Image: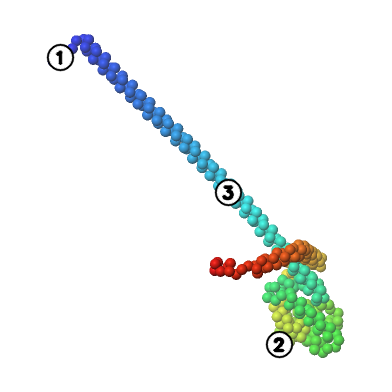
Amino acid sequence: MSFFTRWELRDRATAKLVGGAKKQERALKKTGVEGKKAGAAIKRGQVAARASVTRSTASIEMQNAAMRKLGSLATAAGAAMAAGFAARKIKAIADMADRMSKLATRTGTTTEFLSTLRHTADKSATSIEMVAKGVQFLNRAQADSLEGLETAERWFRALGISMDEVAALGPEEMFFRVATELGNTANQATKTQAAMALLGRSGVELFPLIDAIGTARSDAEKFKLVVTEDMSAGAVRFNDAMDDMKAAMDGIQLQLFTKGFQDLAKVLENIATTVSKLDTDAFRGMA
């Protein structure tokens, strides 16, 4: 067994303490290095996170901008569609009122009368043009009976309409009178013959309207479908103005294009002359 002196024991203890301190120092240094690495990694993660957030924010802003743009485009498209629909609707109404005015002139009636029957005519699968033909035929039958022609007079009397009424009633009142009596006629053969004699070939086709003649006026007034003379006059003026504007545009185009026809003709003539002078051998290699 070895025996150490007091000094040797002290030196050994001191060396042990020093060695432990150095180990601790190395451990601390290592911990510090690892801490720095961890800190650097955390910083890199923070930078990456901020970059990701920035990219996400930018992407969201781009999406929002795209959505706003789409919304603006949709709004503009909707406004354009609404404007187009409104323009077409205005033109359709103007055309209808204009047509009422022209038919009224042709039949000797008014736009109020024809527009009163238009809704009922549409519902009964006839047309206001067919009504106008019937009114025109009835006007001739009324005139014929007043001149003593027995055929027309006989069918007026068959419907219970006196010659005094034939002489006194205008085209509109006469049409309603004849239509009402035809609607009240139970015998189908008599109804058909009277309709054809007084309203022409369109008379039979007008039976659905004739059967509903009692509600024609009230329906037109209820739905505010009556076209007044002022309304039809405005529609005629509007359509005439549209036609004039179209004619003016056509005139401008005509002047612009016709002035260039001479120059275009010269160019085409020169091309034709040049092509005609080409040697056909030059094209054989291309075949």
Depth check, mark 2 against mark 1: the one in front is 1
N-terminal of the pair, mark 3 or mark 1, is 1
Q: State if disc 1 and disc 3 touch (CB < 8 Å).
A: no
View extreme (left): residue: 1
**Can you identify the residue that label 2 sits on?**
189
Per the model, the C-alpha gap separating discs 3 and 1 is 91 Å
Q: How many numbered circles are shown?
A: 3
Q: Quadrant of residue 238?
A: bottom right
Residue sitting nearer the eye, 74 or 179: 74
Residue 47 drawn above or below residue 61:
above
| Residue at 55% in and 47% down | 63
* Residue 76, image x, y percentages: 65, 54
The amino acid marked with disc number 3 is: Ala
In whole angstroms, how far apart are the C-alphas of marks 2 and 1?
A: 154 Å
Q: CA distance from mark 2 to mark 3?
A: 73 Å
Residue on which the image places disc 3: 66
